Amino acid sequence: MRNAEIFKIITNKHVARICVMIASIMCFHQSFMDDTRAGIWFADKLGVLRFPITIIPFLLCCYAYCKELGITFPKKRVRTSGFNILIGYDENKKPYHYDIRKTPHVLIGGMSNFGKSVLLDSIIVQLVKIHPSWCQLILCDFKKVEFHKYREVPHLLTDIIADKDTIYNVLLDLIDEVEFRTNILLKHDCVNVKDYNKLDGIKRLPYTFLIVDELGELMESFDTAAEKRNVNNLLIRLAQRARSVGIHLILCTQRPSKEVVHPNLKANMSGIALKAASEANSKIIIDMKGAELLRNPGEMICKFGEPIYLRSNHVQHSTIREIIEQAKAKFKPISRKYYAQEIPSFDESQVVQEVPYTDNSDNVVSLEKETFTRYKHKETEEAIKLCVKNQKASVKFIREIFSIGSSRATAILQELEELEIIKRDGNKREVLIKNLDELKAS
């Protein structure tokens, strides 16, 4: 049948309606309309149009005719979330996606060489595709080799973390950020970050992901039981409160014992278990046995509610490098925060209004007005007394005493150096005044 005869047939209004309907379906797949084989492929995939091969040219002419008449159809838009992460594939090779914003915090556990780092790479690469104004990353790698390839990713809030002092300061900052975001949500009467970001005329809050490659190494890096207990308490506080304000934890370990994963921490996390060394380890990760029976690398039991068996998504190293380069070219890097190793630039917004010194008879130490008449920070006077009394001066010490951020604590220590109370030697600080009596005499 020639095209002219086909055009003559579809001028009938009843037939034209059918043509418009068919054309509206086919216009979403214009790239498959080049030849007859493509039309057959389209008909087979669609499933509802199992028509004979001879009618395919007729359908193509229907689309062409509607286009000549000026009939346009809106392009099909598939609404997808960038946070809808591909976790793996089920037994039927069907992809399993999950919105990582809706999950509790994630604990990934399993033996070495069974795919934990591969799974983390798959998750990070998918997060890197999201704009940094929506997604920000904090990567902690105590192995110092796994996350090195992500050091130039524009989504990073800090450099790759590989020491205990930095991760401790980061955890304290995240606690401060949770309090800050909670107050914002309360002010705007919002339950979570998703509802808040829908409001008009506000500065949206990005989702922040703290990804730790080896939780066991993190805990072992702290020497005393008190330090380990403090870190556990910080992680538990984040796990309990951070998810509603858009801060998520993804923790990975090959030693899922009670010493590494505190029960209160696990209670607020969902689990992904790869090959486990024992039934006890499997129960710690996913609250059930079964992970010890897995055999091959990449096999896992994912429990975001009901447990499901999956094979993890493997991303080639060349693909990772390509995606990182695309992200570097496409996105502008966010400003990074620096902890412990480097002194941050002085922030004028944190300076308290200077006030004249007033003597307080209740103070243990009475400082001479000629020496200290004004302070840049309201905590400085108390910091001087505590540093001299304890013969200790560090960012961590000041932060714990006053419950402030690392930037402010560093600025206070800088002021103490200017006042010659302490002296900095590399990464260590020495208190020059040995006792309170010497401080009074000075």
Image (cartoon, grey):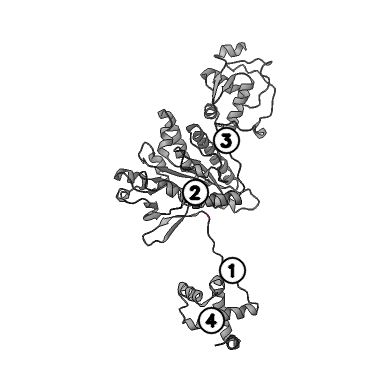
Q: Which of the marked residues, 1 or 3, is nearer the chain's N terminus?
A: 1
**How far apart, in angstroms, are the residues tagged by discs 4 and 2?**
46 Å
Please give the residue where the numbered disc 2 appears in the rendered image. 124
Q: Is residue 351 left or right of residue 89?
A: right
The residue mark sitting in front, 1 or 4, is 4
Give residue 343's quadrant in the image. Answer: top right
**Residue drawn 49% across the image and 83% down it:** 54
Helix, strand or loop for disc 2: helix
Q: Foreground residue, 249 or 294?
A: 294
Q: Residues within 10 Å of mark 4 (few under 14, many from 20)?
A: some
Frontmost of labels 1 and 2 is 2
- The earlier-in-sequence mark between 4 and 3 is 4
Q: Which dot, 4 or 3, sits closer to the camera? A: 4
Q: CA distance from mark 1 to mark 3?
A: 46 Å
Work out whether mark 2 precedes mark 3 in sequence or the reverse, and give the earlier one.
2
The amino acid sitting under disc 1 is Lys
In front of the other: 291 or 198: 291
Q: What is the secondary structure assignment of the residue under circle 1?
A: loop
Name the quadrant containing residue 230.
Answer: top left
Where does the magenta region start and end?
74-82
